[in-house]
Amino acid sequence: MFITLVLYTDGMKVIIKVQRVNSATNYESTLLVNDDVAYFHEHSSQLRSQCQGFDRAIITQANTPVGSTIVYAGEKKTFKVTPEIFSTFIKGSEMINFQVNNTLLHPVIVECRLTKTDMELEVLRYTNKISSEAHKMIMKHVKPGMKEYEMESLFQHYCYTKGGMRHTSYTCICGTGNNSSILHYGHAGAPNEKTIVDGDMCLFDMGGEYYCYSSDITCSFPANGRFTSDQRNVYEAVLKSSRAVMAAIKPGVKWTEMHRLADRVHLEELLRLGLLSGSVDAMMEVHLGSVFMPHGLGHLLGIDVHDVGGYPEGTERVNEPGLKSLRMGRLVQERMVLTVEPGIYFINHLLDQALSNPKQSCFINGAVLQRFRGFGGVRIEDDIAVTADGIELLTCVPRTVEDIEAFMADSEKTFSPVVSSQKV
Ligand SMILES: [Mn+2]
């Protein structure tokens, strides 16, 4: 394995890429994409010093000769390609056998990947657009009697034929019935092989990848296109928390607080359903939310589906049930791209654990809970980009119960993305 540092100008922009190449497969994965010239100026000496140590470094300069002025990304920033900027880089052959300083390089790369440039956002909008369309196509096609893996295959086919996306961002999760409560279902040991049954909830978590950039979308809906009243209630509880979180996200908010907000809405709704009783504050004290949502609310998204940067040095994980699974612990910043993916699941061993814990079982109505054994789970996962004062919703699929039922019934009724908790 070696790392390549590429600096090139592509007509209008300067891109710095650090690539890791697996010499066995020649598969390249990009670790850093940055087209911010100001960033480059600021860090050029640091980056240069870190080149010392790459097993191999290839520096290329295309199109634009040294000394020319580049207009950056159509904005009024100009960047003079000075000889000294290239002086070290341009002589690639001299850079063989340097030592990598990962201690210095790692945090630089992580910060580059944390917030997205305009061009990166464009690619992420694209991955979401195509993947949303593929999810909608699946919703039109799914029928009891089909296999879960048919849905995986159809999704991949759509992404590749319509979007040129050769890979998905992760192995497709196509859980139906009780399988929808298995968080990472679809792996080699359980390869989406169940037959879909009338009455099943489907939980399809799939995202296409384009030029290394990911998408990560989950749609939950009934296989037969009509929600039962229990399915509707659980679904709408999750949709309510999703939209409450989206309405609250803006630069400066704590991601851990967003997770707690989702937990609180879930508990309030399960209380309303009669599945729980008592004080929601007291339930929060004993982390009852994590019984129903044992994963984190969401994560950074970018070149990797669970992208880097969630815990920089000095940011500690909150060691509480649920919260400890969060892949990001830092404050929300403009230009971050995140998933918002609350869920409510009925996972037998977690339910049994809670029932045997007097601090939690006192809130649970066992008889009502019994009805939900085998229900599976609901997750609603959208991708968002953080703006100066809120969010841009990148995912566009039917989300309300009414939209889903109308859409699956083959109605041409249009739906509009719901971004406010008020509309749910
Ligand atoms: Mn996700």
Image (spheres, helix red, strand yellow):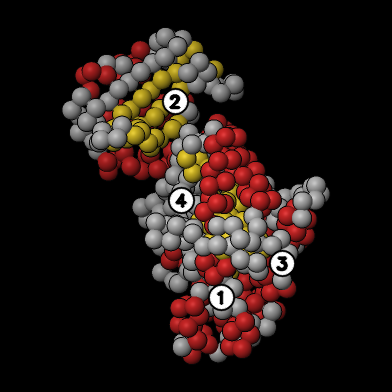
Disc 3 residue crowd, few under 14, some 14–19, many 20+, Cα 10 Å = many
Question: What's the distance in space between the residues labelled 2 and 4, CA to CA?
Answer: 30 Å
Kindly identify which residue carries mark 3: 227
* Structural distance between the alpha carbons of marks 3 and 1: 16 Å
- The answer to whether residue 315 shows anywhere in this view is no
Give the mark nearest the N terminus, 4 or 1: 4
Residue drawn where x is 60% and y is 83% of the image: 369
Q: Residue at x 53, y 21 (%)?
A: 72
- Counting residues from the start of the chain, the first of labels 2 and 4 encountered is 2
Label 2 crowd bin: few (<14), some (14–19), many (20+), radius 10 Å: some
Picture disc at residue 374: 1
Q: State the SS at label 2.
A: strand
**Mark 4: amino acid:** Thr
* Mark 2 and mark 4 residues within 8 Å of each other at the beta carbon: no
Q: Secondary structure at mark 1?
A: loop
* Tag 2: amino acid: Ile
Closer mark to the observer between disc 3 and disc 2? 3
**Residue 108: in sight, yes or no?**
yes
Relative to 393, 21 lies left or right: left
Q: Of tags 1 and 2, which is closer to the observer?
A: 1
Does ligand 1 reach within 8 Å of label 3's beta carbon? no
Left or right: 170, with 229 as reference point = left
Query: Mark 4 sits on what residue?
Result: 171
Residue 15's mark? 2
Q: 10 Å neighbourhood of mark 4: few (<14), some, or many (≥20)?
A: some
